[in-house]
Image (cartoon, rainbow, N blue to C red):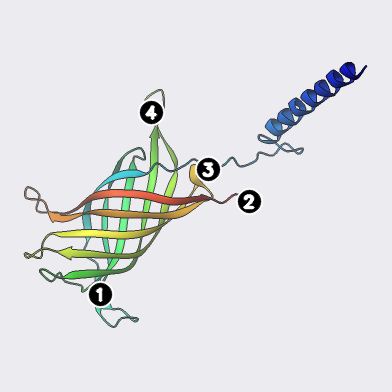
Amino acid sequence: MKTSKYFLLVASLVLLVVGLVGTAMAQGKTDSKGTSFRLPPEPIQSAVSVSAVEITDGILGVDSTSGKETAFGYSFLGQATGSLPGSFTLSMNCAPAKPVPGDVSELSGGSWTLPVYMTSIKGGTSYAGSLYGTIAKGTMSWDKTGTNATVYMALDVEGTQTWEGVSGYASFVGNLYVDEKTQKTMLDGTLVFSTINHVLE
């Protein structure tokens, strides 16, 4: 008698769990009104390679906080390759406005964007969403010639579409230099994402 009750209890629990899982899976797609739930955002791969060219050396002005002469909107445009391929834009405020050989320039703010275009199984590309944010802080350490610099930036990160609800931080480490062939100022480096949180409604 007790054995029969035990088997009935186990069977009931199994059916209950299966029912709950089925309900959860159904709710993961639509609610009772048939509207779609937003799925959790995709995780961001840790590192992306960036290669960009200077498009403007900015507008000279005086920073109201520091009182230093600053190049506002010192900007680059390029590409990101690797796990998050797409176009990359960067605009920063740099002081002093003109490089001082052997000195360090402070990056007092700015913004960046990375619209991502993923390759499908059929070989085409489609827009997957964007990662973007502001420059929290940064430095440009110039060499003795004043034409090459080691660049470091700490970035805030947010996302859209595939990465909607993502927030966190990233770092950029790279080199600014003048290309010998084109004589254009280039910025190459690696964008590394970290401390990414999924903020769901």
What type is the residue that disc 4 sits on?
A: Gly
Ranked by sequence position, the earlier of labels 1 and 4 is 1
Q: Nearer the viewer, mark 2 or mark 4?
A: 2
Q: Nearer the viewer, mark 4 or mark 3?
A: 3
Dot 1: what SS?
A: strand
> Residue 177 appears at what percent x and percent y?
14, 55
Q: Residue at x 21, y 74 (%)?
A: 96
> Residue 149 appears at what percent x and percent y?
16, 60
Q: Residues within 10 Å of mark 1 (few under 14, many from 20)?
A: many
What type is the residue that disc 2 sits on?
A: Glu
> Residue 167 appears at what percent x and percent y?
48, 53
Look at the numbered discs 1 and 2 and tell me whether their residues touch, using CB distance below 8 Å. Answer: no
Q: Which mark is residue 41?
A: 3
- According to the picture, the residue beneath numbered tag 2 turns out to be 201
Q: Residue at x 24, y 49 (%)?
A: 189
Between marks 4 and 3, how big is the CA–CA gap?
22 Å
Q: From the viewer's perspective, tell me whether residue 188 is left or right of residue 135.
A: left
Which is more toward the observer, 7 or 36?
Answer: 7
Ranked by sequence position, the earlier of labels 3 and 1 is 3
- According to the picture, the residue beneath numbered tag 4 turns out to be 124
Q: Residues within 10 Å of mark 3 (few under 14, many from 20)?
A: some
- According to the picture, the residue beneath numbered tag 1 turns out to be 70
Q: Residues within 10 Å of mark 2 (few under 14, many from 20)?
A: few
Between marks 1 and 2, how big is the CA–CA gap?
40 Å
